[in-house]
Structures are given as C-alpha cells and as structure tokens.
Image (tube, rainbow, N blue to C red):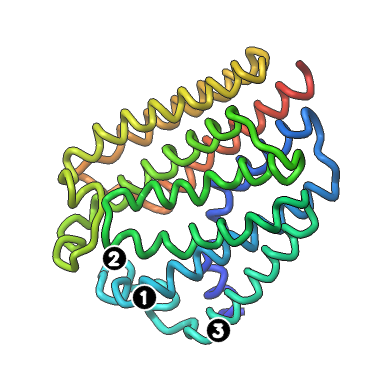
Amino acid sequence: MNKITAHLSNIALYHTIFALPFAYMGAFLAADGLPSLHDFIFITLSMIGARSSAMVLDNLIDLKYDSLQPRLSKRPMVTGAVKPREVKFILLLSLLLFFFSASQLAPVCIYLVPLAVFVLVIYPYTKRFTFLCHFVLGSALAMAPIGSYIAITNTLNLTIVILGLGVCLWIGGFDAIYGSQDEIFDKTHHLHSLATEFTAKKVFPIIAVIHFISILCFIFVGLSYQLPLIYYAGVTIAIITLIYQHSIVSSTDYSRLTQTYFMRNGIVSIVIFIFTVISILFK
C-alpha cells in the first residue's frame, strides 16, 4: 500500500481536478447535452492516461533539479520511494491507455495523439530555454476541452479554441505564481520562468492581467453558445475565487501557497463545468 500511495503521489492524481471538469465541459458543449456513455468513459480514460504520462515525464526529466530543491525533498522520486524503472513502466502503461482510449473516439483523435504527447514531452524542457514555460503547461491542459470536443464532433471551432485559451491562461498563470518562489534557485541553475525574466514582484500584477483575460475567454464561450444567465453565476464564483487566491499570496509572503491553495483552484473548473451543464440542459 505504501508503494501504491507513493506512485499515486508521484503522478499527483488528485490534480486531475484541474483539467477533467474542463474536458467534460468540452464534451457537453460538443454534444449540446449529455454525451454518450461510451464517449464519456473513453474521454475520462484518455485524460487519466495523458495526465499520468505528463506527470511521470515531468518528474523523470526534472529529477536532477528536484533533487537539489529543498522544497521538493519529499517527492517520491527524490526520496527513492519510487524507482525510475518503476516510473518508466507506469509511463508505458499510461501512454498505452491514452492511445487505446483515443482510438475509441472520433477517427481523427488517434492521429492527434502524437501531437499531444509532443506537448507533454517538451514542457519540462521548456524551463531550460524560455520564461513562457508556464503557458506550455497551460497548453497541455488546454487540450482537455479541445480534445473532448474533437473526440465527439471530429471537428473544431473557434469558441472551443477560446475556451482552451482560457484554460491555458488560468493554469499557466498559477504555475507562474507557484514558480515565482523559486526565483533564486532557478537563476542559480540557469532555469527560466516569468520570475527570472521579470522578478517575482512583477509576476503578480502580470498574472492578474492574464487571469482577467482568461475570465474574458470564459465569458466569450457563454456568449458564443448563447448560454443562459445561470452560466455567468458560475463565472462570477470563479472570479471571486481568483480574486481571493491573488489576495492571500504575494512575492513577500508565500506561506499560504500550500496544497490547499492549489486544490482551491479546482473550484474554478468544477464550478464553471457544473454551471455549463445546468445551462445546456435547461436552456
């Protein structure tokens, strides 16, 4: 059980809460109602496979830096609770699950899997050469609603791309805030982030603007699909959550930048998804 717990911690399975609701949101918008049980199941499995692969790749590729970072000293791969060979086996299983699940959805999905995997692989390396690495991570999660929409319709439209952009900016923004506490460490080891480029102090106002744009993206989706007013109640809750999250952390005080802080961000995806479903089913 300890080994299983260590592996679940290594892939941070609970962080699925950030992307999975947006994947379901894309599915409900694509179906203009309830997606089929078949599509729902294989979209879920695709998400689990893709996200597990992403976390394993990130931990493997960044292990040499994580081992030097005191803040990450309790990560399972750093402590040795899970071994690289075990993680590689998990990676293989996760990729197989991703490929198989994608093959059960719209025909185009299986051809898009290599592109998705490329984004997952390239993300950890972007920290080596660009301060925009946070938004490469955001792009990986933006594939959740976009991929779900394609999985059902076999097509793509501008509104879903805008939804994906909103997710990208939302996730990328919080990753930049999280990374800003490592400004000195990153500079010392020649890693890049928004903080190393502009200083941690300037990250917070920059991300406030980026999160404002992400909210505009969510509003655009509601207008484009002509969703009823109840949808905007969800967006309002997301706005309040974002404002609160920004108010309790600063470049001089990271004491509240805890796991609870990030799990609270899951409220945004869950609330917007729930109110989207209500809006679609009762419009």
Query: Going by the image, does 31 lie left or right of 241?
Result: right
Query: Going by the image, does 202 lie left or right of 162?
Result: left
- Mark earlier in primary sequence (2, 1): 1
Q: Counting other residues with Cα less than 10 Å from the Cα at mark 3, is it few (<14), some (14-19), or many (20 or more)?
A: few
**Mark 1–mark 3 distance (CA, rounded to whole Å):** 14 Å
Residue at 73%, 46% (x, y): give it: 151
Asked whether residue 252 appears in the rendered view, the answer is no
Residue at 31%, 77% (x, y): give it: 64
Q: Position of residue 249 (x, y in %)?
A: 28, 40
Question: Circle 1 sits on which residue?
Answer: 63
Q: Amino acid at mark 2?
A: Arg
Q: Amino acid at mark 3?
A: Glu
Query: Going by the image, does 45 lie left or right of 126?
Result: right
Label tally: 3
When the figure is inspected, residue 271 is found, relative to residue 182, above or below; the finding is above
> Considering the numbered disc 1 on the image, is that residue within a helix, a strand or a loop?
helix
Q: Quadrant of residue 88?
A: bottom right
Question: Circle 3 sits on which residue?
Answer: 86
The circle on residue 71 is 2
Q: Quadrant of residue 42?
A: bottom right
Q: Counting other residues with Cα less than 10 Å from the Cα at mark 1, is it few (<14), some (14-19), or many (20 or more)?
A: some
Q: Residue furthest top?
A: 229
